[in-house]
Amino acid sequence: MSTMTTEGPTRSRRTLKLRNTLTSWSFILPNFLGFGAITLLPVILLFYISFTKWNVFGKATWIGTANFTRLLHDASFHKALINTLYYSALHIPLTLVISLSMALLLNTKMRGVTFFRTAAFFPFITSIVAISAVWNMLYSPDYGVINQVLRSVGIDNPPGWTNSSTWAMPALIIVSVWRDAGYYMLLFLAGLQTVPRDLYEAARTDGANAWQRFVNVTLPCLRPTTFFITVILTIGSLKIFDLVLVMTNGGPGQATTVLSQFIYKKGFLENDYGYASSAAVVLFLISIGITVVQFVVNKKRDES
């Protein structure tokens, strides 16, 4: 009799647990299926195709590591890799510093702060084509506003900007930082809202000035936000493509050709999908490697 009495509640708990499990899976399963079909499966196929010679038409021929060996001796790939690292090395720190500075400025109770926040975010949601057209006009060596201003202050030979192999990449970085800073500013603003006010009051009581409060209170409290922004900013910088394609198309010469554009040219313009996939695998491994290093460094800082 007592056994029958305890089986009832136990069966009810199992039924409730099974129902909750099925309900949970029904919410997350579509996301997993989408991730598997749209992201995971293409990545697995990418690795396979990188070891083949394939032009979309016909059967892929297995050629082992020949594509990767070809990359080692391809001057165009080397140039694209250097340009990508060059772009990332300047774009990441500049965007971090400027977006954090804007967030600190717009986190104060100044008049019109909502307008300035919106204005700073506006470039991020503006069409890349429109941005490129406007900046190309501003960068025009002969008629652009920027060079006219530089000449008016006594610089007789201003940069050729996107027409110069030396200045094309800095010109792209300036536009990219200007466009992305507003987005990352919002993330820093969200992080600043989590900093306890009590810490600032305690620092003021101890006589800390504004710089000391920034270094000893703001920056440590913003570490999780800064880490997150650094990771996604690094990945985004390594994958830069659309702005380069529309603004300079990799030129002049190969001055602004980046890895994503190299992959695009080899795959979609030359139909050399096996070779393009091998370059994509290299870009994937670089992104994963740098991200893992960032996670390891961040974990060691947390433990110290």
Image: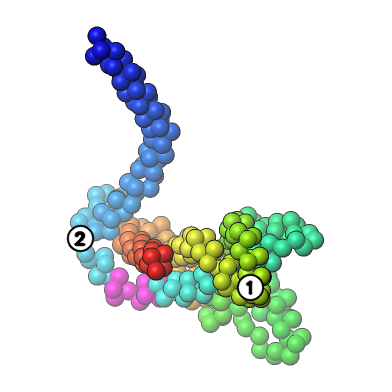
Task: Look at the numbered disc 2 and give the secondary structure of its residue.
Answer: loop
Is the C terminus in the top left, top right, bottom left or bottom right quadrant?
A: bottom left
Q: Going by the picture, which residue comes out furthest to the right?
A: 111
Q: Please state the horizontal and vertical placement of residue 303, each as a whole percent of the image.
A: 38, 65
Q: Going by the picture, which residue comes out furthest to the top?
A: 1
* Residue at image point 36% right, 30% down: 21
Q: Nearer the viewer, mark 1 or mark 2?
A: 1
Picture quadrant where residue 143 is located: bottom right
Q: Is residue 29 above or below residue 112?
A: above
Q: Is residue 270 visible?
A: no
The residue carrying mark 1 is: 206
Q: Amino acid at mark 2?
A: Ile
Task: Look at the numbered disc 1 and give the secondary structure of its residue.
Answer: loop
The residue carrying mark 2 is: 63
* Residue at image point 26% right, 65% down: 67
Q: Disc 1 or 2, which lies upstream in sequence?
A: 2
Is 288 magenta? The answer is: no
